[in-house]
Image (cartoon, helix red, strand yellow):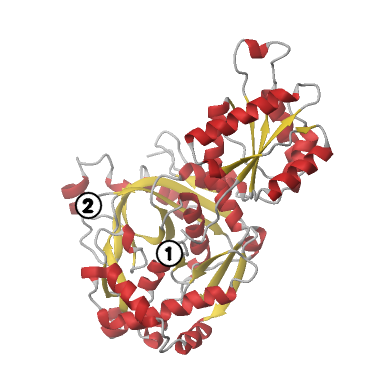
Amino acid sequence: MNNIPKVKIGIVGVSRDCFPADLTIRRRKALAEAYAKKYDAADIYECPVTIIESEIHMQQALEDIKKAGCNALCVYLGNFGPEISETMLAQQFCGPKMFCAAAEEDYESVTTAGRGDAYCGMLNASYNLALRNVKAYIPEYPVGDAEDCADMIHDFVPVARAVYALQNLKIISFGPRPLNFLACNAPIKQLYNLGVEIEENSELDLFESFNKHAGDARIADVVKDMEAELGEGNKKPEILEKLAQYELTLTDWIDGHKGSKEFVAIAGKCWPAFQTQFGFVPCYVNSRLTGRGIPVSCEVDIYGCLSEYIGTCVSDDIVTLLDINNSVPKCMYEDSIKGKFDYKQTDTFMGFHCGNTCSKKLTKGEMKYQAIMARSLPVEVTNGTLEGDIVPGPITFYRLQSTADNILRAYVAEGEVLPVATRSFGGIGVFAIPEMGRFYRHVLIGKNFPHHGAVAFGHFGKSLYEVFKYIGVCTCEIGYNQPASLPYPTENPFK
């Protein structure tokens, strides 16, 4: 992934002046050693400045972690901690931050000389963070020994990566959205609230740039790269030159329009006029850029693109955007799922899109034409999709969305892609999520989510939930697939 940040977390130990500072220093060193032993030592930086109830110490620590290149912060309470200066540090540090605290270590540590009382200090820290309107990640149980706190910091890494990236992201869109696709409506106020910049362009601007790339000397090399990727799946070799021209159009646009931001994602146009004017569909190019960590959503879905990018940062892997598309036929369920996997038929569905999923996430990708568009158009202008069944394995289905009245909502659901042949077209898979039927009705429909959902390949619900909380989504607006024992507020109790 070359379009996401590398996180470096500065660990700053803090101490109350009525406690021995060496207690915090010793515990901070043990924490750094525990992290380096278990995880990548490059993730962290141990700040040598210990804050002891002093704004001067706070400024010294802030300057030190900035010089060290830290873009995230961990305030570590080695003892009770100075609630004012420690939360001032969080307030003045511009990147994502977390708080955790040291547990008492042994019988000796609960004596007068060795007790730290950080369990108590976390309460005052959280109170003062609220007073200062400072957001911070606080683990589910934020008190532990060196190994425990190392695990907490490691859990923070993907959260910090996503939060930092959003503050430094530009979304480039080419629109307008297709007619009758109100589902892709994207109120931009919340993008600005998140620190995300949005550049909205016309499809005509894109077409002009595409035409200027005709005959580009780089096209031949891009075609060769496409041929190598597709291998035997190269069923439409005649379209590769145009696709390469379009890929260069997008990558040059990114280079020329990134501006002050570090990272970019794209919400692209793909129909109805795209195929007749460009002479192809852009799905395969979208898949290739997404495979490099530059998500390109379909149908000018700006919040779908944003969701994909969050998942890319959290998973440090390729993601995709799919329609929550169609039910699994009863015959397929009976033949291929029932008795083999522990899912009801209503737990299953098919996730589909025309061909935007990266070849690395397909069992066997083939370049084809877009079958739905070809019902009313010549096949030759619908070439450019990458079709195949999506690789089986664990997944997380999720989305972040702004409502028309400017409320951020999200959902997260973990499940899997089943190793079941879809017998269908496009980039498609048979998905299974526990209690999907109820989730579909009371979250996806009940909370008015659109049909596009982002897919991360692995279980990342814990991190995604924390990201959504951190960026300001009310927990009452984060849906998930609740177990059967926990009814939704809108669920009819009379079944």
Q: On residue 420, which mark appears? A: 2
- Left or right: 158, with 14 as reference point: left
Front residue of 170 and 335? 170
How many numbered marks does the figure carry? 2
**Mark 1 Cα-neighbour bin, 10 Å: few <14, some 14–19, many ≥20:** many
Q: Is residue 18 left or right of residue 31?
A: right
Amino acid type at circle 2 is: Val
Q: Residue at x 50, y 59 (%)?
A: 309
Q: Secondary structure at mark 1?
A: helix
Res. 78 visible in picture:
no
Whether residue 380 is situated above or below residue 190 in the rendered picture: below
The residue under the point 41% across, 44% down is 459
**Residue 303 horizontal/vertical position (percent):** 52, 62
Q: Which residue is mark 1?
A: 290
Element at label 2? loop
Foreground residue, 456 or 116? 116
